Image (tube, grey):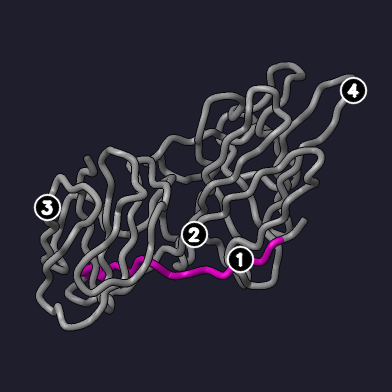
Amino acid sequence: MKRKLNILALFVASLLLNGKNVKAQINNYSVNQTITISSGSFTIDVDNDSNDDYTFEILPLSGSFKAARVISLGNSKVMDVSTFGYPDALNFGDNVTGPYSSGNAVLGTDVGGGGQFTGIGIKYLGLNIDISGESHLGWISLEVVASNDTIILHNTGYNITANDGITAGQISLTTVNENSLIDFEIYPNPCQNLIGFDWPNSNSNVIYSIADLTGKLILTGASFKNIDVSILASGTYIITILEGHNVEIKKFTKN
């Protein structure tokens, strides 16, 4: 099975560097794919450049044993700091950093207890993607069930600037410390089924995205004043508002 995913650039941050306004961007989107033996392997072109980057598969072993694997394609690699062949299961906010390995890598297997992802919930795999001969760092959130016969892929993201850093689950190059580039207010906060927002240039739509505190992208769209959040479970979320090349991130609570 193979899927070419259209990438929506949802977040653009304007960073001040040496007195100049430097634009940088992280592309991220939902994958929402489950891989089993019966489903077959799944190949993803993360950056949608017509060059496949990774294949995820469940490999039958002797007896009833199985291995959940990722195969790096072309010049793409995965983060593998601890043990060669068993890439690191990153937590949200961990740095995606070398060393990296190519070829076959085991996410989880019941043979010898190998693999870092087995049965521990959603974790992040660090990616080093080759785009036109340059290295771009990224991540993909995934689960490997305890029986090692299922991989669940959730979301992925990567830095479109070659050789720039990224952390696991990062969806914007700003932080959640509410550093204002667009000075907007959310109301009510806490909210129930609808949130409104006020911002200075409120005569046009803005692009918005809502993620949970693990970085999982839940809602995206464009709005003039209000956002329907009735599908969200109770909890705390991160909303990003994008207008032109300006962005701000804030937290809100859904009751």
Q: Which residues are magenta?
A: 3-17
Label 2 vs 4, first from the N-terminus: 2
Label 4 vs 3, first from the N-terminus: 4
What separation in Å lies between label 2 and label 4 (alpha carbons)? 36 Å
Callouts 2 and 1 close, C-beta under 8 Å: yes
Mark 2 = which residue? Answer: 29
**Mark 2 residue type:** Tyr
Label 4 vs 1, first from the N-terminus: 1
What separation in Å lies between label 3 and label 2 (alpha carbons)? 28 Å
Point out residue 139 in the picture as x, y percentages from the top left corner. Answer: 51, 49
| Along the viewing direction, whichever of 82 and 231 lies nearer the viewer | 231
In this view, the mark in front (3 or 1): 3
Mark 1 = which residue? Answer: 5
Label 3 vs 1, first from the N-terminus: 1
**Mark 4 residue type:** Ser
Residue 3: image quadrant is bottom right
Q: Callout 1 environment at 10 Å: few (<14), some (14 to 19), or many (20+)?
A: some
What separation in Å lies between label 3 and label 1 (alpha carbons)? 35 Å
Instruction: State the residue at coordinates (77%, 19%).
Output: 111
4 falls in the magenta region? yes
What separation in Å lies between label 4 and label 3 (alpha carbons)? 57 Å
Instruction: State the residue at coordinates (29%, 59%).
Output: 228
